[in-house]
Amino acid sequence: MTHRVFQFDSPGTVDAWRSIDDVVMGGVSASRLRFDSAGHAVFEGCVSLENNGGFASIRSDAMDLGVAGASHYEIELRGDPKRYKFNLRTDDSTDGVLYQVTFMPAPGDWARLRLLVADFRPTFRGRPVSGAPPLDPARVRQMGFLIGDRQSGRFSLSLRSIVAG
């Protein structure tokens, strides 16, 4: 059984998301999640390596996003050929351990990307955290997307939906 966590099909669907870019540490990267009138959301912006920066991200507000027993997340997306991370938090904090998986969308047409819960790794500020428990999808409180890894320049990742199954 699947559970639609986010469906980006109307303007208000992006209201529960915030940008968190490297400006928090002195960088100058900028991003946003906007609604596109074609019926989807777009995570877009520019990553700059100036001032020791180099990342841009968006994150949902903290809310109950848990799906007990989920084995995967499926994201309907269209992107550029850059590496992104899908982030999940199991608490309401703005900093701390999060669970990440890296993906690279095929450029061009819309696709469904399937990410296994078992592939998410606990990290803290981009570094692996040893001894952290595996991701429990029933406890997910926040979701987000990040681009970093010294990939400077403009980026664009279109999103239609996030489903847990």
Image (tube, rainbow, N blue to C red):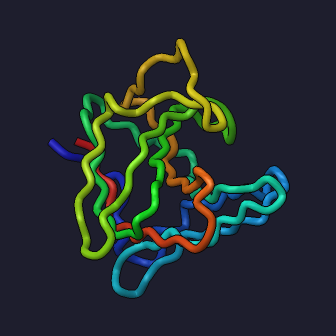
The quarter of the picture where the N terminus appears is top left
Task: Give the answer, above or below, for where 122 lies relative to 62.
Answer: above
Q: Position of residue 57 (x, y in %)?
A: 59, 57
Left or right, 122 with reference to 101: right
Name the residue rendered at 32%, 28% in the picture. Answer: 118
Left or right, 82 with reference to 54: left
The residue sitting at the top extreme is 131
The quarter of the picture where the C terminus appears is top left
Q: Position of residue 146 (x, y in %)?
A: 54, 53
Towards the viewer: 103 or 7: 103
Name the residue rendered at 30%, 30% in the picture. Answer: 68
Towards the viewer: 26 or 59: 26
Name the residue rendered at 26%, 39% in the picture. Answer: 72
Report how many numbered discs are placed on residues in the image: 0
The residue sitting at the left extreme is 1
The residue sitting at the bottom extreme is 37
Left or right, 142 with reference to 8: right
Q: Position of residue 101 (x, y in %)?
A: 42, 41
Q: Quadrant of residue 125?
A: top right
Q: Position of residue 159 (x, y in %)?
A: 38, 67
Name the residue rendered at 47%, 17% in the picture. Answer: 133
Task: Give the answer, above or below, for where 8 lies relative to 165.
Answer: below
Task: Give the answer, above or below, for where 97 lies relative to 156.
Answer: above
Q: Quadrant of residue 140?
A: top left
